[in-house]
Amino acid sequence: MSGPALSRPAGLIVFGAVLILVAAVTLALPHMVNNYLVRVVIVMCIDVILVASMGLGNGFTGVFSLGHVGFVAVGAYTSGILSLPVTMKHAFLPDLPHWLASFSLPFLPATIAAGLVCAALAAVVGAPLMRLSGYFVSVATLGFLIIVNVVLINASDFTRGARTFAGVPLQTTLPWAMGWMVVTLTVLARIAYSPFGRRFRVVREDPIAARAVGLSILPVRLSAFIVGAFFAGVGGSLYGHYLGAFSPASFYLPYTFALVSMLVIGGMGSISGAVLGVVLVTVTSEVLRNLERGLDLGVIHIPPLYGASQIVLGMMFILVMIFRPSGLMGDREVSPGLFLRRKPTGERE
Amino acid sequence: MNMGLYIVQQGINAVSLGSLYALVAIGLSMVFGILRMTNFAHGDMMMVGAFGTLLINAAGAPFWLAALCGVAVGAAAGVIVERLAYRPVRGAPDVTLLLTSLAVTYILENLGILIFSSSPRNFPIPDIMNSAIQLAGGQITFTAINVVTIALTVAALALLGWFVTRTDVGLGMRAAAEDLGAAQMVGLDVDRLIVVAFAIASAFAGLAGVLWAAQSGIVEPDMGFTPLLKAFVAAIVGGFGSISGALVGGYVLGALEILIVAFLPSSVSPYRDAIVFGLLIVFLLFKPNGLMNRPQEVKL
């Protein structure tokens, strides 16, 4: 099923209503719930950006990359280096080249720069890798993730190596995270459900037919990969400015698995699936993480079970793979259009 | 130091490391050959085998018996995982299989953390295995565990070679790797063949796990992941799906790593893993069928 099929004014009204709702939640939330929950919501917004951007390549074009977190890492480090205050740079990164050490960018330009660096990297890396298919592309992009990790650990002039990269200003507030999430989802939805975005699904469903009608596959896959990497860089920057201190190990296999499980459980071919996956996995693991510390229910005493929440998450993942391999949402979308009268859309794609 | 002797010394190190990679890569390739599945959970059978050995040894069994049981526990774990997680998704697209195995590895590693905690544990081995063997007046030094690793790998490979060329089940496995559908059509019990393949593959991984733990002296829940990734490289360099290819790939990779560490400037060696995975990407792009495999469709 395609995305929203609304007449333009109705679509704009709905979009405006969603914006107002998001703004209201953003303003009201800190007054309604405690700080811990606000932090959970910020992380959820960042994860939505990362998972939805991963879904564009992995789901819509069907090239399952395990290297997305590599771009997140590059984004976090790029914006961290750019926005670190100059005095901190002298203290923490004495070997930084002069042209980088002499200035410090505000949050927004640093984030956009991180996205652009990741997009450029994706163009270089993707040009060869997007030729591969199936498990080969997954293994090759996993190789990319490992190479990024090794380079970050060894480029200690820029990254302090395996040690913690600290001192990044804590600027990712709820409005920033929400704002970037709305921008990301809007841009991704506009791309994925545009005539150009239809090509993504064509090359996924039938590469041979796509070529037969004159559609070359590499540029299509590559463009999805580059757009995904841009938002991975943005999300990485947000995450870096949320954590304030991170190391290459923060952006490695465990985070990859967390994001992949959100994407797969929610549904790979759907942007609302990405949102649903993030919400479900976050809520489940937050609840389980609290149970994991052990419970004392008067009569029953449950000892702490570290690792149990991840096991439950892994089992959820496998059950989805067995019973609903295309995820909870499949390739359907929850769009504002569901609540309004649809234009007749003719046959399905 | 004499250059010739240095090369011999590093050659021994390379064969010892390559043997471990080959043991893991062969199982990976066997399963891939039959099911077209990139089995991420394969590396965790190393962890299962090593922890199994540790527990049985701690319960009082002599080390050799414990190691044998540990290998058997690894094989059993592989069969259980196949039955519970992989059989229900058999025949699904590549990515579904890959993701399922990724979830299994996540579960197994966290199960390891739950039971044994995430901190590494000592892996006690008999003193005789740690004894150093010196040749050429001390210029070549290696431990008994290197010899045991190489000897056991050769023995395991010989056994596997005999099994896949001389027994009905082994021949059936090769038939299934050639064409699973056709093997089923001519009346082979495919379910049983797959169980046997997982048992052998996981036993090999379990053996590699025991040897790996014996060499490093520690066991930890995520000990299998790095060797697994290396085994992926080895299997793909050799030709994914081919047993002999995995063998060749394992030794090529072992030699390459030792070459980087022992013969290149020391500023290069921290980038060892990056070079290895760069090689993987180069192979996927330019020689996706590896050194030993028949052509197959992997690119656009």
Image (cartoon, coloured by chain):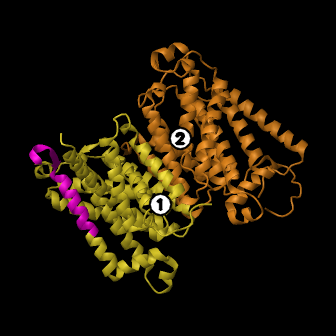
Q: Quadrant for the C terminus of chain A, please.
A: bottom right
- SS at badge 1: loop
Left of B134 or right of it: where is B184? right
Residue identifier under label 2: A70
Q: Is residue B153 magenta?
A: yes
Kind of residue at disc 1: Thr
- Chain B rendering hue: yellow
Q: Chain of mark 2?
A: A
Which residues make up the magenta segment? Answer: B135-157
Occupied quadrant, residue B56: bottom left
In the picture, measured across the screen, residue B167 lies left or right of residue A291, that is: left
The single residue placed furthest to the left in the displayed view is B137
Q: Quadrant of the N terminus of chain A?
A: bottom right
Q: Nearer the viewer, residue A194 or B281?
A: B281
Depth check: give the residue in front, B44 or B55. Answer: B44
Whether the magenta-drawn stretch holds residue A301 is answered as no
Most common SS among magenta residues:
helix
Q: Colour of chain A?
A: orange
| Percent position of residue A240, x then y | 55, 29
Instruction: Using a 10 Å C-alpha cutoff, classify the residue at mark 2 as few (fewer than 14 neighbours), some (14 to 19) or many (20 or more).
Output: many
Q: Is residue B263 visible?
A: yes
Residue under the point 78% across and 51% down: A196
Q: What residue is shown with label 1?
A: B38
The type of residue carrying mark 2 is Gly
